[in-house]
Amino acid sequence: MSKIGRLYRIAGPVVVAEGINARMFDIVRVGNERLMGEVIQINGLRTTIQVYEDTSKLAPGEPVENTGLPLTVSLGPGLLTSIYDGIQRPLEVLQKQMGDFILRGVDASGLDLKKKWDFKATAKKGDNLEAGAFIGEVEETPGNIHKIMLPPNVKGKLAEINSGKFTVEETIGKLENGTELKLMHKWPVRIPRNYKKKLPPTMPLLTGQRIFDALFPLAKGGAAAIPGPFGAGKTVSQQQLAKWSDADIIVYIGCGERGNEMTEVLTEFPHLIDPKTKKPLMNRTVLIANTSNMPVAAREASVYTGITIAEYYRDMGYSVALMADSTSRWAEAMREISSRLEEMPGEEGYPAYLSSKLAAFYERAGMVIPQGTDKQGSVSIIGAVSPPGGDFSEPVTQNTLRVTKTFWALDAKLAQRRHFPSINWLNSYSLYMDVLEPWFKKNVADDWRDLVDKFMTILQEEEKLLEIVQLVGSDALPERQQIVLETARLIREAFLQQNAYHDIDTYCSLPKMYQMMRAILKFNDLANQALDKGSAISDIFATKTKNRISEVKFEADFETFLKKIEKDMQDEFAAVR
């Protein structure tokens, strides 16, 4: 059997070849144009391949060559600021080669092979190095240090190492066993990178979004799902998380989304300023674009490419946030490939292995101690889901919920009422609340969890009361329950709503969230105390200061503003009879 065979059958992105000696997941070159494909089924002498490019004009009899290697990504300096397609071809390089439309069969290295990087060795000759050990560093972008590591499957005694200016392919050192060391190495995308130990999540991934950080927090190294119907605000929410989360590195995967949405990301991100460093946000971001009009087979590759790059930066001891928008498009690609393979369909036509594929992806999140260091690194995964018609009972959403511990449910009705972010506080949940409570106690306030619990209690009570209100009106409710409704309104309008396009309200710090929660609950307490003293409910609701709480969202000096509101509120209630 040779490495070169012939095309036997073509069915869209799925082709069958004869006469190649292949293993599962080998990368092959298909046809005279040498399109990239991956082996997904072997049946005797026939090999089934999913092609990552458009297969129109392919014909039976054209050559198929097996490279003998799995799908790998190039890992090294130059990843940050890059915009890739699903198989790590830099879109900017492709655009220079062929214009705005990608031609078939075109290759481009994932890293710039000509650029010289200033490498500073930190390991010394004679050091015994374990797999994944740091041997030096490069300043990849201003302020971002790229740690050069031994590949996860290489170890030995260092025979020589040199500082200086090198390209990613030049030799920077050698081990005594003859292994040459370079600034880059390659790693197969379907195999998770090794680590020493997985740790329990104990720190929140702070996003600056009030409903996420306060009510439904995500831990660093955790996994979250953000499902919602068309137009509910998934992409804007994902972009807000990418912009403002306190992760060191951002990997954003546009997996099968509409081209116009991805265009917004590609045009907006290069102009965003990182709030921490005041430098461009792209300096710590990798973008992977695989839009809905690109070949479906590359969607799966884009997800694995993104998570492998995220794990690489995790191994340097960094906190990485990965946004996948959306995993539903990836699942639809799996369904299409599965049907062309004539596999037995599962629920709603998805393949039977849908749940295991989703679980394998989300399980690559985690807080770990990487090989070669005692530093902690983490990968947090936030996967958007696009259920048809907003039906959360469909298979992709349900299988995602089984493996994620944070669920941010987007609601079309809230979006229609212009309530953004349109996260439904009754359907959403976070299973990280208990493990993160000590962190919030230590870093924000002792009573943080108490305030959050009171907020949720009031919101849940409001939902029950609204059913009665629809029948008899709010005036028919007991006065104490009317206070619950008024407090819930303040929570919704002053706290949960957040303007992504306002210069100040787009990001909210934890101290500001805490002070806002206190101010809202202060009104609740004062109102109930006034009621106990026999004050009329109409006089309580006539107080004007409470409505100014929502103005604090747009104030930079929030502490002074809130202190004045609390004092004025106290004075107003003192005058209520």
Image (spheres, helix red, strand yellow):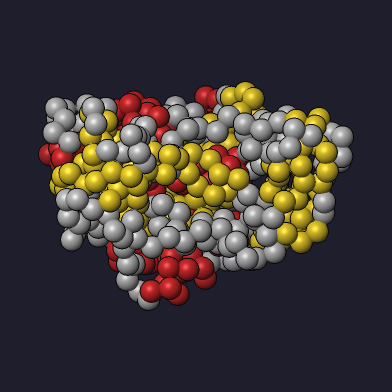
Nearer to us in this view, 112 or 492:
112
Q: Is residue 121 above or below residue 70?
A: below
Q: Where is residue 164 drawn, in percent x and y?
A: 80, 59
Q: Is residue 374 above or below residue 317?
A: above
Q: Does residue 366 appear to the left or right of 24 in the view shown?
A: right
Q: Residue at x 54, y 49 (%)?
A: 74
Q: Where is residue 414 drawn, in percent x and y?
A: 26, 50
Q: Residue at x 58, y 48 (%)?
A: 75
Q: Residue at x 35, y 38 (%)?
A: 2
Nearer to us in this view, 376 or 95:
95
Nearer to us in this view, 382 or 563:
382
Q: Does residue 229 appear to the left or right of 521 in the view shown?
A: left
Residue 397 visible? The answer is no
Q: Where is residue 473 drawn, in percent x and y?
A: 17, 43
Q: Residue at x 34, y 50 (%)?
A: 29
The answer to which quarter of the image holds residue 58 is: bottom left
Q: Where is residue 268 drawn, in percent x and y?
A: 45, 68
Counting the numbered discs, the total is: 0
The answer to which quarter of the image holds residue 436 is: top right
Quadrant into which the N terminus falls = top left
Nearer to us in this view, 41 or 459:
41
Residue 125 visible? The answer is yes
Q: Residue furthest front?
A: 1
Q: Is residue 95 above or below residue 511?
A: below
Q: Does residue 548 appear to the left or right of 158 in the view shown?
A: left
